[in-house]
Each structure stands twice: as C-alpha cells, then as structure tokens.
Amino acid sequence: MIQQTSPEIGGMGHSVKRKEDRRFIQGKGNYVDDVHLPEMVYGQLVRSPYAHARIKNINIENAKQVPGVLAVITGDDLAKAGLAWMPTLFFDKQMVLATGKVLFQAQEVAFVVAEDRYAAADAAELVEVEYEELPVLVDPHHSLDADAPILREDREQKSNHIFHWEVGDRLATQKAIEESLVKAKVDAVFQRCHPAPLETCGCVADFNTATGRLTVWLTSQAPHAHRTLFALVGGIPENNIRVISPDIGGGFGNKVPIYPGYVCAIVASLKLGRPVKWIETRSENLQSTGFARDYHMTAEIGADPDGTVKALRVKTLADHGAFNAAAQPTKFPAGLFSICTGSYQFPNAFCEVDGVYTNKAPGGIAYRCSFRVTEASYLIERAMDVLAYELKTDPAELRLKNFIPPEKFPYQTPLGWSYDSGNYRAAMDKALEMAGYRELRKEQEEKRKKGELMGIGVSSFTEVVGAGPSHTFDIVGIKMFDSCEIRIHPTGKAIARLGTKSQGQGHETTFPQIIAQELGIPVADITLEEGDTDTAPYGLGTYASRSTPVAGGATSMASRKIREKARKIAAHLLEVSEEDLEWEPGKFFVKGAPSKAKTIQDIAFAAYTNLPAGMEAGLEAVHYYDPPNLTFPFGTYICVVDIDKGTGEIKVRRFIAVDDCGNIINPMIVEGQIHGGLTEGLGIAFMQLISYDESGNVQGGNFMDYLLPTAVETPNWETGKTCTPSPHHPIGAKGVGESPNVGSPAAFVNAVVDALSHLGVRHIDMPITPWKVWQILKEKGMAE
Amino acid sequence: MIPPSFEYLKPRTVPEAISLLEEHGENAKILSGGQSLIPMMKFRLARPGWLIDINHIPNLAYIREEGGYLKIGGLTREADIESSDLIRSKFPVLHDTAFVIADPQVRNLATIGGNLAHADPANDHPATMLALGAQVVATGRRGERIIPIEEFFVSIFTTALQHDEILTEIRVPVPPPGSGGAYFKVERKVGDFATAAVAAQATLDGQGVCQGVGIGMTNVGPIPIKARTAEGFLKGKTLTEITIAEASRLAAGDAQPSSDSRGPAEYKKALVKELTKRAINRAIERARQ
Ligand SMILES: Cc1cc2nc3c(=O)[nH]c(=O)nc-3n(C[C@H](O)[C@H](O)[C@H](O)COP(=O)(O)OP(=O)(O)OC[C@H]3O[C@@H](n4cnc5c(N)ncnc54)[C@H](O)[C@@H]3O)c2cc1C
C-alpha cells in the first residue's frame, strides 16, 4: 500500500508538473551543441558513397590546404595507434575509420578537424578517396547463399553468418503443431526503422594536456558505461576520464552505442590538445547510426478447434548490417525476443534466430524497447489475429480465451520467463468498454454491406522491462544494477544523484517524487542530478524502460536507509525508544501521542547539530539496486481505422490505450510517455522505413523521406489504466516508457488487415502506405 | 549541412537587382523565401557564387484585383495568400493550394514567385496556375514581358525566365460568374510534397454545361502538366457523373508519373483519376454557390 502524501509533498500519484520543463520551454536547456569552450575546434566526417568498395587510395593533400584545417585523420592513422577498430556492445568489432574497404554507404572514412565548421565542411569535400566497387549484399535472405560476397574479411569465419540462437523445446513444439487441428502462420517483417531523436548524436572531447584529464560531453544514455569503455579501449586511466551527458534531446536507444565520431573527436583532441566538437547532421544520424528492428519473422501457432492455443514456433532472420552493433545484454544474442509467447498460455514453444551481415549501417539497437520485445510483441499479436481468422472467431474473444489468468502469477513461460504479475482480462475488458467494441463491430458489418472499409485492431501485449537481475543480465560484463545517492542538507533540502540519464522522460520530477514518498520531503526541495560520471554513482543508464524498475528501486532503498537513520535521531530528540515511534510521510511521532513529533527537517538539522552519542554525522545514503526479477507491464490497445478506397489512405479514427504499469509515480508523465510512444508507433506502422536500393544506396536517409508524424496525422489518444503492482519492486512500479511503442504497431496493422479481412487479406508488412493498400484493393477488384 | 561560401548582395530596387544579375551572370541566383534554394545549398546541390536577395525591394508583395485580373506580387508570402479574403472568396482553388504547401513556418517565408520560378514539378502552385490560365510577368533590362503559364515551365527546374529576369507578378484572369475551382492533394504527411495533386477550375452556364475548364497536375511528370485531353473532352459538355469520370480517366492518361518512394507510377495515375474527380466535383459545388 502506498501512503497518500499531500500535494505539497507531492509523492507518488501526484501529477507534479515537470521541473525540467521550465528551462526547456525557455530555451535554456544545455545540450551538447550548446557547449562552447575556449580554443574549441570542429570535426567533420568524410563518408563513403558506396555500400561495398575497396579503398585504393586516400589523398588528403588538397583538404589540408584549406585555410583553418588542423588535421585530417584516416583509418591508417588510427591503425598506428591501434584504434582503427573498436568493440561493439555485442561481441563484434566495428571500424572507426575504414581501412582496406568500406562496408556500408555513409561509413566513416576520414575525419577533418578545422578552426570552424565551414572550413571543416569545405575540406571534407576535398578529401579524395579512390574506391573500387565490390559486389553488394543487400537482402539478408541472400547473406548465406554460396555465391554471396563475404563481407567481413577480418573474421576468421568466412561466412556472413553471425549467430544462431534458440530457446525452447524444438521437438515437442513441432509435434504439438503437427497434431493441432487448427494451424495459423504468418510471415512478418518488422522493417528497419530508426529512432530519429530530434537531437542528433555528437560530442565535445576536451583533453587537457596539463592535467592529463579527458572530459567528454556526450549524447549518451549510459555515461558510466561509456566512460569504462573509453578507458578499456583507449587505455586512459578511468579516473582521468569524465563523461558528462548534459541535456539530451531524445535517445530512444540511438544514444546507447559508441559511434566512430566520438572516438575520432577524442583522438583529435588528444592529438591537438584542444577541445574538439563533432555534431552529426540529420542525414548522418539516419544513415549511419544505430537503426532498429530489421527482423524477418515467421510464426506458426497450433490450436484446438475451440481456439485453445497449443504451441508456438518462431523462426527469424536478423539483419545486423555490416557490424553487429546491437546494444543488449551479453547472454541474449536476440535480446529478449523469447518473450514472444506474449500474454497467452502456450504449453509448448520454440524460438530460433539467425543473425547475418549485409552491406548496411550497423545495429540494431533497441528503439524504445527492451531488446526485441517490440518485434516479439508485434509478431505474436499479428499471429493471434491470423489464428482468429482461421477459426472465424472474434480476435478479442480469442485473446480472452487464451490469456494467462491472474491466479497463475508468477507465471513461468515455456521460453523461460517468470512473469511477476498480471491481470490481462481486466485491461482488455476496460479497453473493450472504452471502445464500445460491440457497437463498433456492428457498425463494421453495416459498412461492409455498403462497400465501405472500416477495421478494428486489438493488441494485448505483455512487456518485459527493467533489465536486470545480476544473475542473468550484464552488458560487456558489467552487471545491470543501478544506483542512487541521496544527501539531505541541514535545512532539510536534498540532492539526489542517479546512475541513469533522462533524455526527456522527466527524471528530475519522478525520482524526487519517490524520495518525497519515502521521506516526506517536498518534491520542490529535492534536486536531481544525472549524467556526470564525476559526481553520480555508477549505473548502466537509461534505456529499455529500466530507470524506474532499477534506479527507481535504488532511490526507494536509499531513501529507506536514510529513514532508518532518521528514526534513530528522532528517538534521540524525542527521548523515546525507536520502537515507540511511528512514521508518516514527513515525520516520526510517538505512538499514541501524535503531537510529540519530529519532522524530517528537524531530524536533518539534528543530523549536523545534535546527534546521539557515537553516531556518525550527516544524513545520506547510497544504494545499488539489483532487481530480483524483471517487471512485466501489459495492456490492451484498440485501434479503429477507416480506409479511403479512392486513394488508399488510412485514417485512424480512434485509438484506445489501456496500460497497466503497476503503481504510478506521476500520472501526467505516464500519460505523456504513452502519447509519445503511440505517436512513434503510428509512424512505424504507416510511414517509416530505412530501405536500400540494390546498389546499397540508403533511401529514406533524411526527413523528406523518413517521415515523422505530426499532430495533424495523430489521432486523439484515449488512454485508460488498470493497476497491478509488481510484487517484487519496492514501490510496486513496473516502467512504462516503451509500452506504447511495443504494443501499438500490432494494433494499427491489425486494424488495417481487419478492414480488408473479408477480402481474404491476412497480413500486410509495415509501413502500410496508401499505395500498398491501393494495390491490394486493386488486386481484390475494389479499386480501378 | 553547410553550404560552400558565397557572396551576399542586397539590392533595394528591381533595376538594381537586374544589373547585379547581369554583372554576375550564371553564377548569381535570386534569393526570395529561401525555402527551396537554401536547403539545396546546404546539401551542396546548388552552389551559387552570389546570392541576390530581393527581400528588401519594396512593393513586390501584394494581392489585389485590377483590370480584370488578380495580381499577386512575386514576393508575396504563402501565408499572405492563405489568409487573403479576396483569394478565399474569389479564387478558392488558390486558397486550397496555399493551405497545403509545406507547413506554417515554411509558408511564412516561402513566396509564390519562388514557388513558380523554382519549377519543381512537386511544387503546388504551378498546377493551380495552369488550371487558372495565369500569366507570369517577367521584368528584365528591357522592361516587362508577359509569359503565359503554359509556356513557363520548360523542363525540371527550368523556366522560360531569362537569367537576368525577375518574376515580379502573377496575373490570374478573374473568372466569370458561375465559376469554381478546387485543389486536391494526397501527401504522406502534412508538409510533404504531393504524391499527386490535381487543380481544377470550371465555368458552368445555367444548364450545367461546361463553358471552360482548366486542369493542372502536380508531381506526375518532369514538369507541371496541364491535362489537355481531359479539358478538351469536357468543354461544351454537361458535367455529369459519367462525363466527369471520363475526364478523370483522360487526365490520368495525360499524367506521366514515375515510380518512387511515394508510390508506383500506376498508383499515381489512379490518384490523378480519383483526385480529378474530386476536384471537379468540388469546383462544380463552388461554382453553384
Ligand atoms: C519543409 C518544406 C516543405 C515544402 N513543401 C512544399 C509543398 O508541399 N509544396 C510546395 O509547393 N512547396 C513546398 N516547399 C517549397 C516552398 O514552397 C518553397 O519555398 C518554394 O518552392 C520556393 O519559394 P521561395 O520563395 O522559398 O524561393 P527560393 O528558395 O528563395 O528560390 C527558389 C528558386 O527560385 C528562384 N527565384 C525565387 N524568386 C524568384 C523571382 N521572383 N524571380 C525569379 N527567380 C526567383 C531562386 O533563384 C531559386 O532558384 C517546401 C519547402 C520546405 C522547406
């Protein structure tokens, strides 16, 4: 039970306005590109125009002649320092600057440093690179062909195969599917898309030749991990590196990897002894940095004629581009994709994934996603709809029939997860009611009679967030705990520092709310700092909806340590024993005598002025929280679309989102997260694709072709909630940021397919553009 | 996103601008709203050595009715066209068009002169001006000359303007009573260039017989296209569901789209057909108001 706090304290459940917004709204944020240092110079990358080509020669002479140019660095220069390659976050390595050959269009080939951005841009154009084109491999389905070009000559294994990973019981699943009377199958591609944060990636690297210290302002979602990697790869003692993530303009997983531009800026600063700024353009961000998804998936379900599911089999081809630059826990080559049994009771399941190389930008990162849960959730929610069509049953009914019931939690899935808590039916019922589902189905039936196209899509996702427990989760060996340090000042105000890093999620508000909840200190009196590795405790950063489940747990636990000490001080001040004291948010009072009380502010002052004998001064604590399990948020989304038969355009008429993320810290911020994630899901479902032509030229490498939805395209999101607390989390919270991005693509696609299902349509790959719909209508004789 | 270096010149009169254009030759470019030119420079796709900024020349931005014409100054911003009562009431097709160009920020700067002079087949005004039978006023050293809009678009990014001429005005004949027009655009999202778009302007007599019709099409060919076959078919006919359907089919035949990320050519032809139908129907509705 969460004790209610007053609005002044602003603990959990209060829609406290975001403390950070005052500076953002006034244009007073401080982003990496706002950092200006004396003597600072600018870097620009020269990139490959080819997807696969041998580098015959690089001539930098003309570039060096441009006035203001200070250095032109090539792969050969880096090779001399042993830095031409760097490790990725997943058992692979990646070229910093190309040596020998290039493997994708827009790959980094040289780094020009100049006194200003203009000189750097002019000189970059004058770096002459002689290429000899090589055969290009674009389609991952051909990566393993006998005559496919071998892309990675640096590897011992002369193949484009990266990994095979499987989980579950292959034979039992095969048998169960064979024996099932009803079978459903879907081939679905979760297309290559890009997180496209509005702030691109960049850094300012400042090596101080006098102190030997390197300070890097970095667009980083994980500043501590990046500091450690810089130390390990660059050989600089870790105490001599300071990484600062200032304000970050959106990350969505794109700012988890280390990019060649960062390394080049650091090398240039070491070489020149001057601060070097490097900031990507929009096109560079879209064309070269961590893409997401690109999973080519097949799901098969076996079921009884009454709709009871018996088995799920999933086979997937993962396109990682030129280097496996996935950023995910070490033990999970395909991330948490084995969450693919979703919200349903499958007695049998088997899942296998093969990763391959192609001549495309490296990745794939977890875009607002716990490492492939988005792909998994999309797949199972699509497959359930296909099964519903096979059975000629309502997709909502089919889901209700197969949901894991509340009494079976904690629930052990056949692929190894232990779901902490859930009440899927409650969320579904609420969504059906909000939507007026039965009336919608009636309306659809009538519309069909008139030849009009309307569809209703349902998606009942189960999320997996909060990586993660140290027994299973680490990134390059570092356990995925997270941390919080709290110091209470003598006047009762406080500062807290965390190992996470907000990129817009509202940490400066929600984490103080946790402290306010635990200690009764008003949220206005608590300052929160993240992102400076010199001051914040070590943590693995913010992605995969892990901040609240992990760092939020740490914040709670650190607060409780402080409360324990506060109890001792209060007992001393009130001259009673600790057992005689009772706590309510903000004060200890004597049992049965509520007027005999000491506020947390009184206690804070005493911690520096009037301590019990023998007690250490101060009131502070640090906690490293190792979660016992992941948390499993869930929800049901319902989407209603109308299709314009003349143009193929799809209008999302309504979208109902019922989310259950356990106990809520700030309802307004949660709703904002859901609005944002649904809008991203809309873009993915209908607009977005990073594609390549057969020569490996990237299409959609700018905002003219990679479309971000605006308020005009976005429907009115109708949100609702149920609350099933996490049983193992200190405040029963689960995490919510990625749920809407995970759960919504299937709802959108299911709605469009539903609108066309009476014509025999069972699946359409994303993005579902008007022309794709029109082609289907034409094929089915519905359009001319 | 950094352009190569260039010189920036700021003339105060049209003659001054013209002499600067003459002086610097092909290496000089006029800068008006900058919403097409500056992005191309930042991508280094355009590399003018001199930018002749005409934004500081007075009296180049206006919207007025005069001598049977709607006259729009070359430097008039899209935002002003969009909010003009004169245009909204008498030239609704033009209001429709301005409203779907780019987004409000871009429209605050982008000019109608630049939109036509840029001769991008994806731009929206050309089709509308083709439908309206507009005239372009080009001012050069020898004074003004009038170019009928049908002769204005020569090839992609190329117009009938001489290098040292400035587009100073667009003239649209005021349509007779019983006229109406409309612009329909399919775009992938707001602010996008058209996948396809159609402008229609029609004049009907009391019996619903088509006295005159203009149909222009956006982004379905290397230049903005006038649907002459469709226009020819409709003239003198009563506008019915059947004749409109046939005209729409003919308009699709006049289109020469190519396949790209906005869709296959076949789809764009189908769009032209559908949008022509919608535009003519709306035009008729407005003509009868
Ligand atoms: C994000 C974005 C979206 C857009 N979407 C659309 C859209 O949906 N539809 C659409 O139609 N347009 C769109 N545009 C283009 C926009 O309307 C342009 O502004 C317009 O095409 C050019 O007008 P301008 O005044 O900005 O011209 P500029 O960019 O200044 O100039 C364009 C060209 O025309 C020449 N020129 C300009 N004025 C004159 C003149 N008076 N005489 C002779 N030559 C001249 C210049 O030298 C240059 O070559 C978009 C632009 C942006 C940035």
Image (tube, coloured by chain):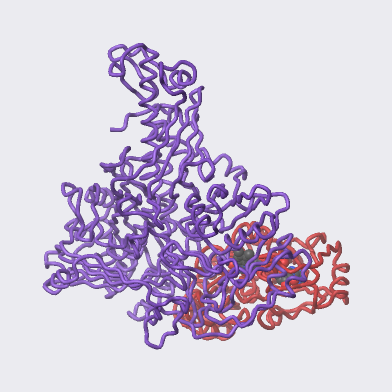
Camera sees residue B182: no
- Position of B66 with respect to A650 (left or right) is right
Is residue A21 or residue A376 the one in the foreground? A376
Expressed as whole percent of the image width and height from the top left, the position of residue A767 reads: 41, 69
Q: How many marks?
A: 0
Up the image or down, A37 lies above or below A109; here it is: above
Expressed as whole percent of the image width and height from the top left, the position of residue A268 reads: 65, 61
Identify the residue shown where x is 50% and y is 37%: A528
Up the image or down, B91 lies above or below A612; here it is: below
Chain whose colour in the figure is red: B
Q: Colour of chain A?
A: purple
Is residue A194 or residue A279 the one in the foreground? A279
Identify the residue shown where x is 54% and y is 51%: A237
Identify the residue shown where x is 36% and y is 45%: A549
- Position of A269 with respect to A456 (left or right) is right
Ligand 1 is in which quadrant of the figure?
bottom right
Expressed as whole percent of the image width and height from the top left, the position of residue A647 reads: 44, 72
Quadrant of res A26 = top right
